[in-house]
Amino acid sequence: MKPLIQDPYNIILAGVGGQGNVMGSRILANMLSRKGYFLTIGETFGASQRGGSVMSHLRVSAASTLSTQIPKGKAHIVIALEPVEAIRIIAAYGNREVIVLTNTRPVHPVSVIAGESGYPEIETIQKTLEGLSSRVWLIEATEEALRLGNPILSNIIMIGAVSGLDILPLELEDFTAVIEETFPKKLLDVNRQAFQIGRDKVK
Amino acid sequence: MPKLNEDKEGIRVLMMGNEAIVRGALEAGVNVAAGYPGTPSSEIIENLSKVAQERHLYVEWSTNEKISLEVAAAASFAGLRAICPMKQNGVNVASDFLLHLAGSGTRGGLVLVTCDDPGALSSANEGESRHFARMIEIPLLEPGDFQEAKDMTKWAFELSEELKNVVMLRSVTRMSHASGMVRLGKLPERMVKAEFKCRGPLLDQETGPVSSMPVVYHHTLQQEKLRRARELFEESPFNTYEGPEKPELLVITGSACTLYCREAIHLLGLKDRVGLLKLGTTWPLPPKFMKKYLALTEKILIVEEVIPFLEDSVKILAAEQAAEIGIKTFYGKNDGTIPMVGELNPDLVAAGLSKIMGAPYASMDGEYAKEAQEAAGALAPERDLTFCPGCPHRASFWSIHKALQLDNRKGFVCGDIGCYSLGARPAGFSTVKIAHAMGSGLGLACGFGKLEAFGMDQPTLTVCGDSTFFHAALPALVNAVHHEANTTLIILDNSGTAMTGFQPHPGLPINALGQAAPQIDIAKVCEAMGAKVVIRDPFELEETRATINALLEEEGIKVLILRQICALSPEKKGKKSHTMRIDESRCLGEECGCNRLCTRVFRCPGLIWDKEKKKSRIDEVICAGCGVCADICTSGAIRREEPVSV
Ligand code: SF4
Ligand code: SF4
């Protein structure tokens, strides 16, 4: 087992209900648990499937089981499937060193659809995130996923991107092994493609 | 992910708390499982049903929690091991039978798993099941991590058999739905024959008839069982202490709060000054064991969710032992060190600890926090919950809302529990004005309907789901018919228990195991009871609206079944019946007389308001292609391009 850059290592996966957040965090966690680390995932779902903000807290440790909720201000990586969710997470769990990866495609809250509130420009989001983190990656994951035929693949693209950053011991083989356990055979190829697209995005 | 019935002893796997509970039950050789879906408990029955065949289990989704406990109890009376999971509200439903059961006692191991929801992350209250354990006088166990969730479940069956009574195992959302590492144990080969022995003497619990009568005899016996539980708990490996020999402060906790406390002590660097007493057997508390630790120090902090249950028990023990252990200062919920409502987390515990110990702790650097929070305030609009794109309920509430407006007698909707509870919010055009327990909508409407004599002339409507109909609306319907209540029950029939993940119910031709099952026809049941029944497709907006208006004019109890499958159902998910398109030349947007009804009022998340073009747009990633919005638009700008081949 490789020592972690920091122990515990705290990852937050955020998005909107229906984006495959739970599945994404499970895949990422299973990749890491294959490497022998202790993992905890804290997540909320249920009512939050209905268009609300959702987030999963992933904690990686070489030694022990930790609180399933990350303490405020203690995230190391934030992976956002939706751009304003990245900002929402940073406000509670961010710090100057945090690394942020965000999908660029907005999912408009109903208040925005109704015209009661506004949705920021992606440039504003980018600038804000840059001011509040050490590194920011904007990834057109939904667009790439649509090209592959299914928007839900955006979460795999984002996980691929995290693996490409070389901050966690995540290899393509681990991913392949985990998706083989998770998905039916006919979906393996497209998932592997999505993962690779994500990896290439951050190289 | 290794399967839950993997027979690999000793390997360590990542499991959700509910999966760990399932694994513990399997390792205990459970035979029967019955429950009613309710977040955060649903995955227990769901996962057991997946391995039912291989592990020779009988698993069912019962019509409600009381019945599920009865089904599980029958197995126990026949000498089998049974598990009955439910959410906190379910315990209220089951409590009538539970009180009797605790009196009669059990035979085969019977474990009642209650999954509470501190913070009400997906509930309409944050009620606690722990108080039932004290009130009904049965032992209570609370796992403090994922390994314990498995191990304690297994042990709960043994304990139940040793005590011959039902044992309660309480989980919380952050245990049930969180995941952590679990080392697997052995799966037994345990084939038992079910037999209900009932020819023995009246007072013989193993072979006699089963009843809580004679009551005083059984109640006495029950209390002896509790005393025995207390003795066993003195030695329980699930009660542990970590920390210095002479701590300045003793933290007493249990459940998921254990992890928060450990983390908070670590965050504040208080390992050498603060001791952590983690309790797994939280009712009744073992007095000798407790005395040993209460004697360690003068200051005691109790950390738990939600109301002070442990705190009360500890204080009673400390009072009883005061002569030997001395006077204590208590911190916890009652003095406000720990909040009295909502769920906890490491930060809240750290804040409490820091106050008592005078150890400074700032979770975030102040300047950063200010900057980040300002950014979020300005840039991250609230995400109110809404019905899924293509959800039949949005269409149903649209019609209900319009019908009530047209009716113009200040009519209102009594709601219920399910996805459609969102009918109280803008997602449902704020149509639902009252929402309480499962089935209560119709019961309330019956009551309102009887207030004519007091001058009430507002018509009522009730909404309930198909699963809720069977769960608790049936007796209310009996009441409504018998007492000639003037109301309309709208059954939002989306063919499943959608809120909790689409579990089958008696209205469907399938059971928990995926086998064919007799289907109960809701319409026929209502008709047989004497109600007038009409069935409509909620996606036919105008017809539905007109039907509701007509029903509002009629006397007596009327049932309108709005039938359309849930957008997340396996049949529908990911399949669009229409590709939608906006004819920009026709979209008048703000200029339209409706001031863009589609996005401003109807608010399906599949629609986007394009600020620059001042036109509506379809978000092809989100739109489910139900086609309903085409009928919302008065200028015919939203078009269905049909049909889509899949
Ligand atoms: S799960 Fe089904 S019933 Fe619930 S909001 Fe979504 S579409 Fe509607
Ligand atoms: S067709 Fe219209 S109402 Fe239906 S999901 Fe798409 S945008 Fe929403």
Image: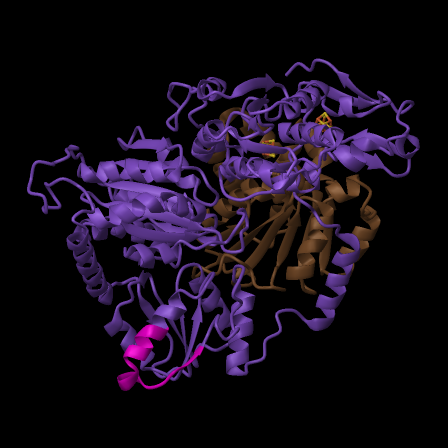
Chain colours: A brown, B purple
Instruction: Confirm whether the magenta stretch covers residue A87.
Output: no
Residue located 39% across and 41% down the image? B44
Asked if residue A83 lies left or right of residue B570, the reply is right
Tell me if residue B522 comes above or below residue B102 in the rendering: above
Identify the main secondary structure in magenta.
helix
Q: Is residue B137 among the parts visible in the rendering?
A: yes
The quarter of the picture where residue B620 lies is top right
Where residue B78 sits in the image (x, y, percent)? 18, 36
Residue located 76% across and 58% down the image? B377
Where residue B333 sits in the image (x, y, percent)? 48, 70
Where residue A101 sits in the image (x, y, percent)? 69, 50
Q: Nearer the viewer, residue A148 or B130?
A: B130
Task: Find the magenta span and give its range.
Answer: B315-330
Q: Quadrant for ligand 1?
A: top right
Q: Is residue B13 among the parts visible in the rendering?
A: no
Q: Nearer the viewer, residue B497 or B142?
A: B497
Residue located 40% across and 70% down the image? B311
Asked if residue B440 lies left or right of residue A49, the reply is left
Residue located 53% across and 73% down the image? B336
Instruction: Confirm whether the magenta stretch covers residue B327.
Output: yes
Asked if residue B18 lies left or right of residue B286, the reply is right
Tell me if residue B126 comes above or below residue B534 in the rendering: below
Quarter placement of the N terminus of chain B:
top left
